[in-house]
Image (spheres, rainbow, N blue to C red):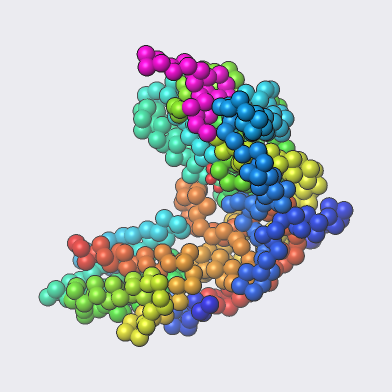
Amino acid sequence: MNAPASIPTTAAAKLPAIREQFPTLAQTVHGKPLVYLDNAATTQKPWCVINAIAAYYEHDNSNVHRGVHALSQRATAACEAVRDKVRAFVNAAEPAEILFTSGTTEAINLVASSYGANAVGSGDEIVISTLEHHSNIVPWQLLCERSGAILRVIPISDDGDLDLDAYRGLLNKRTRLVAVGHVCNALGTVNPIHEIIDLAHGNGTPVLVDGAQAIPHMPVDVQALDCDFYAFSGHKVYGPTGIGVLYGKRRLLDAMPPYQGGGDMISSVRFEGTTYNELPYKFEAGTPNIAGAVGLGTAVDFLQTHLPEFIPLEAALMEYAESALAAVDGVTIVGAPQQRVGALSFLIDNVHPHDIGTVVDLQGIAIRAGHHCAQPLMERLGLASTARVSFGIYNTTADIDRLTAAIPEVVRIFG
Amino acid sequence: MGDLYQDILLDHHRNPRHFGELGGGPTVERKNPLCGDAIRLAMDPADNRICDLRFDGHGCALSIASASLMCCALRDKDAGAARAVAAELMTALTAKEPPDAAGLGELACLTTVRDFPMRLNCVTLPWTALDELLGK
Ligand SMILES: Cc1ncc(COP(=O)(O)O)c(C=O)c1O
């Protein structure tokens, strides 16, 4: 067993103050103080986000881009300010390259449907990987069914790392898009995304990055990565549900047909034909999730404030969790990727992950049990499901201690 | 909150009855999309009676115990009686008011899942397979 990781002390000293900003954390579940270790599914929301959404509905509620009145002006300005904030957050070249969606899932579906409509035809190929979440698999399968394209899958090692040699071999003149996750939600694998993108670009192929599990844990610079699309969800970065972001390079977005038709996405409508609005509105049909955007803006500020201290703290927490769990009799950690962030899957001998989840829930500890929307990965690992802990900005070593202390009870019941 | 993992349930999980070797009769397979668990059920019907009901597959303590208890409870019943037991259990699992589960015998231990709605599908998995099997 490794020596326990040293927790950066100044960052750790601030944790009580950070935890106080999250009202949901201050409750008991089944009579025990809540330990929330399911942050890869969704994070809790700080007061600043909750208050920003309430304040929007209290003072500014209106529709955007439609009225000349003061409230509409305020709501529109608030939305566009968030767009620019997100632009700066991921370092996009211009706000028009930031599209609001309902989440990562819709962002990926937008690209599959719109980019796919023009650029992907029969016999063309799309490359994904074994580590993908279902939302970065099924949209491409649907596109392949529609277009006659072929889905190619980058294999992984037993440790849970992508096989880059195999990836090189998959790229060819029919490859129209590479769509891969930045960080795997089930194993926490951090993919060598720079190299993946460089190899694709060497082949003349654009790359979509599913950033749902990366954005909460590391700074992302889409221009430095040179990715063509980058998708993430607001609710996994302390923002509300129902709002997410698709970054796309203007050159690609301009060439793509609209995704949905409706209000706001047009510049003029006549029954003889309609001309579409410019970016980003071409891809934002209908009334957007305005309150969601407002909440996302506040969440981005919150994350940016705390990320520099959270990164080393989380790295130490991950190391602590890995050695603490591995030291418990009967526990096996799933995978050993070269770099892991955010999520850690484990198994207990002879105990089904759902039963682990229920028994620790009765101790007030929230973890995820199941296939994590990554059934092809589970099949590759020869598992039906795993138990998973995943970290947020408020987790402490005491949370891990509560979990490891609960496991003997699991073993006692089922062992 | 009731005790979900009662001794009788854990016993059927550790030592599932009528498990494995499904034989040559009709079989059905059902999967729980939440966890990927799968149960296969097989029946050897003679004289319109379920003279043998067996299962295999992989699953959590609840789905394995539920399948094991089901096989025990329904052997030697005709299809109509088996359907009636299944219906009584479903009512006991889902009715608004806590049920009088006395008529369910050993199956009554499954009704503690009422306090754990996220786990209801684990218990019902083998019973939905039964539904399909009896329909064959
Ligand atoms: C890697 C990954 N991609 C995509 C998604 C889908 O995100 P959402 O459900 O917010 O659209 C998730 C969320 O679980 C995820 O972990």
**Residue A151, image quadrant:** top left
Q: Position of residue A389 (x, y in %)?
A: 63, 58
Q: Position of residue A392 (x, y in %)?
A: 69, 52
**Residue A387 visible in the current orientation:** yes
**Residue A180, image quadrant:** top right
Q: Quadrant of the N terminus of chain A?
A: bottom right
Q: Nearer the viewer, residue A160 or A136?
A: A136
Question: What span is colored magenta in the figure?
Answer: A263-287
Q: Position of residue A266 (x, y in %)?
A: 49, 21
Residue A311 lies left or right of residue A180; in this view the side is right
On screen, residue A406 above or below A345? below
Where on the image, by quarter, is ligand 1? top right
Q: Nearer the viewer, residue B133 or B54?
A: B133
Identify the residue shown where x is 37% and y is 27%. Answer: A147
Identify the residue shown where x is 39% and y is 31%. Answer: A144
Q: Position of residue A152 (x, y in %)?
A: 46, 34
**A272 part of magenta stretch:** yes
**A129 part of magenta stretch:** no
Identify the residue shown where x is 62% and y is 31%. Answer: A72
